[in-house]
Image: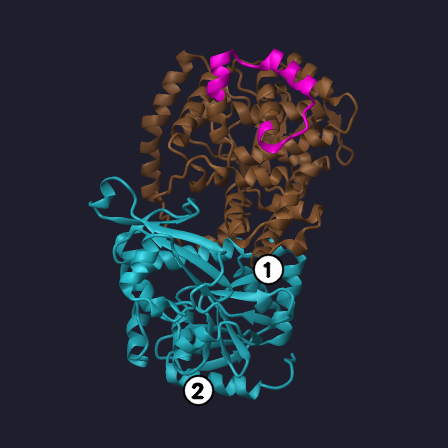
Chain colours: A brown, B cyan
Amino acid sequence: MPMAQVPPMDKQAHLLLSLLAKPQQMADLDLQTWDVFIRQARNADLLGRVYELVAEYQLFDDVPLPVRPHLLSARRVARRHRAMVHFELGNLLGILASLETPVVVLKGAAYVLAGLPVAAGRVFSDIDLMVAKDHLDEAEKLLKVQAWLASADSYDDKYYRKWMHELPPLQHLKRHTLLDLHHAILPQTARLKPSSAKLFAAAVAVDDYPNAYVLCPEDMVLHSATHLFQDDEFKHGARDLVDLDTLLRHFAEDDGFWQRLVSRGEVMDLSRPLYYALRFCQRMLETPVPESVMVQAARVGRPVGPLAFCMDKLLERALVADHPMCVDHFTGLAKWLLYIRSHYLRMPFHLLIPHLLHKAFISPIKARRMERKVESRPTIEGLIAENKAK
Amino acid sequence: MIVGDYSIEALQGLISDSGLRFDVGPFTVSLQSSLDKFAADIHLMYGAYPLSTQPFADFHVRLDQPFGLRRWFRPQTNFTQDGRTPFKPLPLVQSFAMFEWGLNWCVSSQSHQYLIVHAAVVERGGMALIMPAPPGSGKSTLCAGLVSRGWRLLTDELALISLDRPGEVIALPRPVSLKNESIDVIRDFAPTQIIGPIAHDTAKGTVAHMAAPRESVQRSGETATSRLLIFPKYSPAASTQITPRQKAASFMELADQSFNFNILGELGFRTLKEVLDHCDCYDLIYSDLDDVIVQLEHLIDANGTGTADG
């Protein structure tokens, strides 16, 4: 581990989000601030987003020369990702067409497919699809024949199939693309119970592919919020918050969106994550959430006083850029507590304790055994292969 | 001012504190490290590189020992860029090699303002000789030999090909990585060259680096125009053989050795085509460094004017 300098949670830690909240400020940054900004944006996987904002606000001439290659480079990676998502979606939706049942494209891939502004400059680590639970086995079989295989170890494989809302991650044998095949957006054991049937019923058909859908705008926001605020790792915390902000700003152009969003949150049993989403988007990215909507979302989704206070303290640490300079003495503890919380939300204690013990003691031993077998030192061939896989 | 203007102690102070910022080809590197003796390696291998004058670095990298027992028991080095660790730690004695490999990773994964090909590039009379080759082919040995006989080093590993100036190669002169027998071959062939710390038992066998010649570092700002594309192969006791090679096959090989051909898409294809349009392509078998260097000099001098045909 690097010997991270530990500054207080000052301006530097919030530089990334404060600039994304007010992109016009990029016009007046000195080179030293760019030096910090670029590094935070890169670690948060938001460099491509920064390029898009610079282009949108026509600030490229204000960007100092040494900084420009980083933005252009990120743009190229983002365009490549986007092209790959289109390619893989064409492939996957083709394979699953014979199910003759709706396939809902989720998260990043859905943003691309629906042509939403949030897709601009975004990079992707996997593709998420959802089919009804009855069709899951058949879908997996169809995918298997086309070289999409589950690669989890035997414990994880069982764990996913028994308790989770998705199959263990599938990976394409040759291209190494990762695919999460869902039947719900939260684990079956989770405390919140959003209905998959309601998600399917409200989903919106996509023109280019038969049987392909994306979630309706309200559900898209709710899913993004659920993903961010119920998940165990905040590795992409800043990126996910930016996704939410961009989605909200875009959908808010439709009359009545905010009201529909809050009502839908109640219907889907997701008022809590929606409250966090609106609160932190407003606080950290200055998303224009109407005051009445904030009040209403708080009434149905805000936790009781002390808990709300603690969650504020934890989340404000988890949502800044994942960079040593954005870390204070409590960041590690905050992330650990959020990790425990996510598991507590995900399953009841009698399942949680054995699972965490397995993850803490058995998994590392297995991982080490695997590691001994695999020579993992850096080689130039490895680097080429790694870049190609992107 | 150059890195070597500092004493080793002063360098150590910088590296262990706010960081040493120096220019390597088109990139500015900010290096920090808590390792005891790292400044000596940097002083030896990067002494000729200019100190950066701007408050912006392309890559902020660190080398540190991991915490815990491994500090004393089989000590290790960790490479990090902004807190991210692309590789597993390596034994402490391989720290310098790890810095080199780490920097390769930074450049190859984050610099898509160039088409990047795994190849050595050397220059003579403004013309670039590009040598893509799988490891073990003798590419680096030949590269070290050529630059020891007056050719200019543009790169030993990462050829940066311009996307807006057709066929131009940008210089990224860095230490040349020598493996196993090559280390002694180059020591005998060019005794005045600086050879850095030797790391035994790495993934690639024994590895040592030859510092880039001072003149190559000073001329980092000059590009070179692609002219010869050579696929070298060392073969013990073989006499030098240079045979023409098909352009289409050469193109495919170059694409295959590229880090970001896919990311660049059509632009990558067009850029590579420009390189091939500028180049004559040959297969090369060699064992005698003196002989092969003379023959390559004849070849590039004879090809000096006009564009490639065939």
Q: How crowded is mark 2: few (under 14 residues within 10 Å), some or many (20 or more)?
A: few
Q: Residues within 10 Å of mark 1 (few under 14, many from 20)?
A: few
User: Depth check: B83 or B100 in front?
Assistant: B83
Dot 2: chain letter? B
What span is colored magenta in the figure?
A283-311
**Eyeballing the image, is A322 above or below A71?**
above
**Real-space CA distance between mark 1 and mark 2, rounded to the nearest whole angstrom:** 42 Å
**Do discs 1 and 2 belong to a common subunit?**
no
**Eyeballing the image, is A137 above or below A350?**
below
Point out residue A27 in the picture as x, y percentages from the top left corner: 64, 49
Disc sitting over residue B294 in the figure = 2
Q: Which amino acid does label 1 sit on?
A: Leu
Residue B40 is left or right of residue B213, and the answer is: left
Of circles 1 and 2, the one toward us is 1
Q: Which amino acid does label 2 sit on?
A: Val
Looking at the image, which residue is at 62% across and 54% down?
A63
Q: Mark 1 points at which residue?
A: A65
Residue A102, visible in the rendered structure: no
Looking at the image, which residue is at 38% across and 81% down?
B289
Residue A85, visible in the rendered structure: yes
Q: Which corner quadrant of the image does residue B98 belong to?
A: bottom left
**Eyeballing the image, is A160 above or below A18?**
above
Point out residue B112 in the picture as x, y percentages from the top left corner: 57, 57
Looking at the image, which residue is at 32% across and 49% down?
B64
Is residue A292 part of the magenta span, yes or no?
A: yes
Residue A134 is left or right of residue B22, and the answer is: right
Q: Decide whether the magenta segment is chiefly helix, strand or loop.
A: helix
**Eyeballing the image, is B263 above or below A345?**
below
* Farthest-out residue, left: B72
